[in-house]
Amino acid sequence: HQTPYSYLDLHARGSFAEGRIAAHVVDLAHEMGLAAPDSLLDSNFVARRSGALEQLLEQRLDVRAGGARLRPEWTGWEITRDRKRVAFRFRAALAASAGRIEVRGPLFPYDPAHETYVNVYDRDAIRAQDVLDAAHPSCDVYLSGSRGVCAVARTFIPAGIHHIFLGPDHILFIIGLLLLGGSLGRLLKIVTAFTVAHSITLALAALQIVNPSARVIEPAIALSIVVVGAENLLGGGRRDLRAAIAFAFGFVHGFGFASVLHEFGLPPGALGAALFSFNAGIEVGQMCIVLALAPLLTLARSWSPALAMRIATVGSAGVIAAGAYWFVQRVFFA
């Protein structure tokens, strides 16, 4: 058995999907317990065993649309003798709201070298191509149109929020920018500067236009935390530079956000929607931090300016200490 491959073609057609699975006779014979794989090249033999073969493939076919597993209705089969494969065609209902299709494989995991080649079409336009194996057992495909955009948003907005709250360095940078307080307009200017900058580099890195090494970006993110804390302590009486710092280091943080997005995986057919949704999730996370912290700092300042200054001083010192620790760790121990 020199060709441990199977093939899955899937066409999404609105309210239903059509598909075709082509499997090598050796794989089918192994799973069916047949001693002679070439017996599956006999149409009469396959006709007698078609029910059992379809039941086997139904167990192995794990395609989910909108989270619900497709239930195939088998519509026919054919034998490709020169390639020693049997192909089965099927049809399955597809929920109108399903904008995301997940394919799990490979179809024949008993063989560690087995690969399943997957082609997913939105009607007749190719949407994604992938190869599933033991190391890469699934792929996600987002369909075109509004339902695909909604599915992308449901996946990538929570991912952006999740990343902000799991990234203590990003959180601490934002906290450092807020510690000195200011008017609503001033805080909006600072947050907007950070947003604009990191959105630019997030897009550039996600699209593989600019992709600096994490060994440079991660220490630079830590350094940005030190800088914002130092500006809080040393910049009293001077012009407020927090918006400029937020903008300058926002470019660096954008590259950090992009590294997470690469690990998460960008859908080839929905790059723009995924980028926008992930960035929107980051903004939601940022605003949660701002809305939680800024009113408390404003309240402290109105109650006791001296207390607010002590909070800013102690907080900034803590920001510098954390940033310096991460910088040393990422430069010398990464």
Image (cartoon, helix red, strand yellow):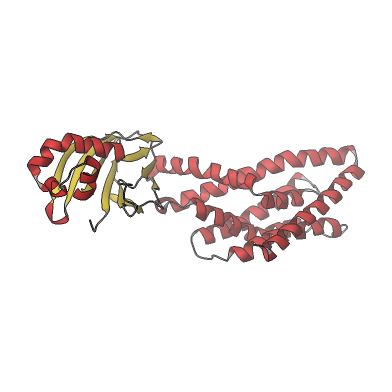
Locate residue 54 relative to residue 181 in the image: left or right.
left
For residue 212, above or below residue 19:
below
Residue 312, percent from left and from top? 84, 49
Q: In this view, does 212 lie above or below 82?
A: below
* Outermost residue to the front: 35
Query: In terms of image quadrants, where is residue 11?
Result: top left
Q: Depth check: 242 or 326 in front?
A: 326
Say which of 315 and 118 sits in front: 118
Q: In which quarter of the image is the C terminus?
A: bottom right
Q: Is residue 145 above or below residue 238?
A: above
- What is the residue that sits farthest to the left in this orientation? 44
Residue 76 drawn at (x, y percent): 16, 39
Residue 199 visible in the displayed image? yes
Report x, y in % for residue 38.
13, 49
Q: In this figure, what is the number of numbered marks?
A: 0
> In this orientation, which residue lies closer to the viewer: 55 or 312?
55
Query: Looking at the image, which residue is at 86% across and 60% down?
Result: 234
* Image quadrant where residue 15 sits: top left
Res 97 visible: no
Q: Residue at x 51, y 55 (%)?
A: 262
Query: Residue sitting at 24 percent across and 48 percent down?
Result: 27
Q: In this view, does 68 lie to the left or right of 221?
A: left
Q: In which quarter of the image is the N terminus?
A: bottom left
Q: Picture coordinates of residue 21 (x, y %)?
A: 24, 45
